[in-house]
Amino acid sequence: MQKLVVTGGQRLRGELSLQGSKNSALPIMAAALLCGEDCTLKNCPKLTDIYAASRILNCVGCRCLFSDECVVISSENISETAIPEELMREMRSSIIFLGAMLGRTGECTVCCPGGCELGPRPIDMHLTALRKMGADIRESYGKIICRIPERAHGARISLPFPSVGATENIILCAVTADGETVINNAAREPEICDLCGFLRACGAEISGDGESRIVIRGREGLHGCEYSIMPDRIAGATYLSMTAATRGEIILKNACAAAMEPFISVLEQTGCSIYASRDKIFLRSGSRLKAVNERIRTMPHPGFPTDAQALLMAALVTADGTSIFEENIFDCRYRHTDALVKMGADIQVLGKTAVVKGVERLYGANVEATDLRGGAAMVAAALTADGKTEIGGISHIDRGYEKIEDAVRSLGGNIKRV
Ligand code: UD1
């Protein structure tokens, strides 16, 4: 079992180029299925979740060729329409392949992506929408068997909640459907725009992405393209939080400052100086952070991102004063707090709310990563702690960060993988 061993006390300082976005790359890899030609994806991060997505693509008959600069996905031949349970369970967001497979072949068998470390992750909105587009969906012994007898047809879909995954699945099925699909209350996350940017480069007709109403005019076939995946805004939030927590200084390169605005505007309230240009972010945090006065409410984009909640909390546990978080997206997204408390943090969780009273210092401890962002938050907290912290369960962290230890070490952090 691998662990990360962190010895706290170093201020992070330096320049870091951000990896490509995991949450963009995954639906874009699924979208490549629709093209029937080669797609070249640049800036694709090298992560276990990305390799899990490539195993799904291989299993249905595509080829994925990884090199240092890019991944080339060839989808001329689709030979299989069932995605085995073990591949579905490797990665929760495997459900994103459903819309693309239906769009390409009219058939797909998957299983429920299963309960998740963030709480139940139902897919009811995905299935209701796909049914509206003509899919016949049956559930049998844990399998979800979907078939569209002819071609999917356009539909008018109003989502009860702007689910990122449901919006992506609808778009993926709609781009090759017959007629127009309108999604009301669509997710507005930057990764949705990135997926639509890729699909447009393949010939799709989509407008309104980034807004609540997306219109897709289906067409029969798409073609291959070369596309560069956007920078990872959550990895960006991670390294900014770590630098802020350690009172350091960083220049983030290859960053998407506009997409990170909802996070940056809250982080600024801790007293850090932050300057952003289009693709660079500079942060300096000379003294102890201040608590954030307003409630930090996680909301769909452009609200404060749920994925950055644990990361900002790791920085605020040693801030001056009390900060209050309200988690509105997932039911079980405070599982990292036990580890932070073990390290000396003062956090009270009551339902959706976490009250974080800043303490003078944290102490190194043995902790276990509970989920991807919670695990990264433990690394951030460990960097500020007195002494050594050992973090287990780091396969969670590897799902979303390209060699996190190399990135932190390049900024002067004392971290190693053992
Ligand atoms: C995506 C992101 C994840 C991020 C989340 C919210 C990827 C790979 N993952 O996850 O990192 O934290 O968006 O920004 O991009 N829901 C239902 N029924 C459904 C679908 C969703 O009830 O059919 C609920 C979920 O349980 C959750 C909420 O809606 O409480 C938001 O989920 P959703 O936006 O779909 O998140 P994901 O796409 O799973």
Image (cartoon, rainbow, N blue to C red):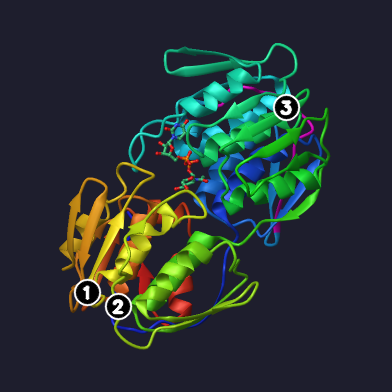
Quarter of the view holding residue 119: top left
* Residue carrying label 2: 290
Q: Amino acid at mark 3?
A: Arg
Instruction: Label 1, secondary structure: give it.
Output: loop
- The residue beneath circle 1 is 321
With respect to residue 261, does 328 lie above or below? Answer: above
Q: SS class of the residue under badge 3?
A: helix
Q: In which quadrant of the rendered image does the C terminus lie?
A: bottom left
Q: Could you say whether the residue bearing mark 2 is in a helix, strand or loop?
A: loop
Residue occupying image coordinates x 49% and y 62%: 262
Q: Is residue 31 left or right of residue 184?
A: right
Find out if the beta carbon at label 3 lies less than 8 Å from the nearest ligand 1 atom: no
Name the spot of residue 271 as percent of width and height, x first.
37, 81
Residue tagged 3:
104
The residue closer to the viewer here, 204 or 27, is 204
- 2 or 3: mark nearer the eye: 2
Crowdedness near tag 2: few (<14), some (14–19) or many (≥20) residues, C-alpha within 10 Å: many
Q: Residue at x 51, y 52 (%)?
A: 301
Counting residues from the N terminus, which is met first, the one under dot 1 or under dot 2?
2
Q: Are the two marked residues, 1 and 2, in contact with CB atoms closer than 8 angstroms?
A: yes
Q: Nearer the viewer, residue 157 or 356?
A: 157
Q: Is residue 5 visible?
A: no
State the image coordinates of residue 274 (x, y, percent, origin top left).
49, 79
| Disc 1: residue Cβ within 8 A of ligand 1's nearest atom | no
Q: Amino acid at mark 2?
A: Lys
Above or below — where is 204 with respect to 15? above
